[in-house]
Image (spheres, rainbow, N blue to C red):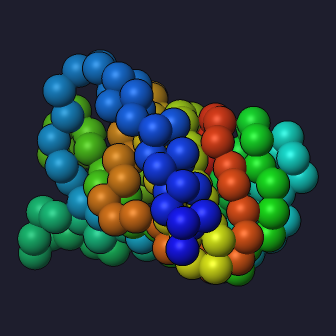
């Protein structure tokens, strides 16, 4: 249990400065992106995992749920193996009016996760439509396995 707590504290300390990444223009909440990420093995410096995501807009009756597929790549320290995980991001945009499929594109930002049995992680990413969309951790990434990852992340949604 102590090892798990230390790993979580290390990941939290690494993610603490992530709020500074989003010092760009003000953004409005436009929905939630829920992703299921395949399990895999970190290759010390890099890892790549496929994912399937569902975007649930917050704009009510006119809202259309969108499905995206893609991959998340991590660069930096990434050691270990995990099973599939679930990540939920709050989607922020400069306006509540955006075209369909606006989340398609490439996002970059900081990442951190620690798993010893059951673990947590978070990724703060900016990109999408003309680099105007921000994905902020809404719920902590939940996964099982043995893994430690700290560094940069690149998410591609199609």
Question: Residue at left 81%, top 63%?
Answer: 80
Q: Is residue 112 above or below residue 119?
A: above
- Residue 134 in percent (x, y) is at 36, 40
- Residue 84 in percent (x, y) is at 66, 79
Quadrant where the image shows the C terminus = bottom right
Q: Is residue 41 left or right of residue 144?
A: right
Q: Nearer the viewer, residue 62 or 151?
A: 151
Q: Is residue 5 left or right of residue 93?
A: right
- Residue 12 in percent (x, y) is at 44, 46
- Seen as rendered, the residue at the extreme left is 60
To which quarter of the image does residue 75 belong? top right
Q: Is residue 154 shown to the viewer in this render?
A: no
- Seen as rendered, the residue at the extreme front is 2
Q: Is residue 17 above or below residue 80?
A: above
Q: Is residue 23 above or below residue 134?
A: above
Question: Residue at left 20%, top 34%?
Answer: 27
Question: Residue at left 10%, top 71%?
Answer: 60
Q: Is residue 28 shown to the viewer in this render?
A: yes
Q: Is residue 62 left or right of residue 124?
A: left
To which quarter of the image does residue 4 belong? bottom right
Question: Residue at left 73%, top 70%?
Answer: 146
- Residue 132 in percent (x, y) is at 36, 31
């Amino acid at each position: 249990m102590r090892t798990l707590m230390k790993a979580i504290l290390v990941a939290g300390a690494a993610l603490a400065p992530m709020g500074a990444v989003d010092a760009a223009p003000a953004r409005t909440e436009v929905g939630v992106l829920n992703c299921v990420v395949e399990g895999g093995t970190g290759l010390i410096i890099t890892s790549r995992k496929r994912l399937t995501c569902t975007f649930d807009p917050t704009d009510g009756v006119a809202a259309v749920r969108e499905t995206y597929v893609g991959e998340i790549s991590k660069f930096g320290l990434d050691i270990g193996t995990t099973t599939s995980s679930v990540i939920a991001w709050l989607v922020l945009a400069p306006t509540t009016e955006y075209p369909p499929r606006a989340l398609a594109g490439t996002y970059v930002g900081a990442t951190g996760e620690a798993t010893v049995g059951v673990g947590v992680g978070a990724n703060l990413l900016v990109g999408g439509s003309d680099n105007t969309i921000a994905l902020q951790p809404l719920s902590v990434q939940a996964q099982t396995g043995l893994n430690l990852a700290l560094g940069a992340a690149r998410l591609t949604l199609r």
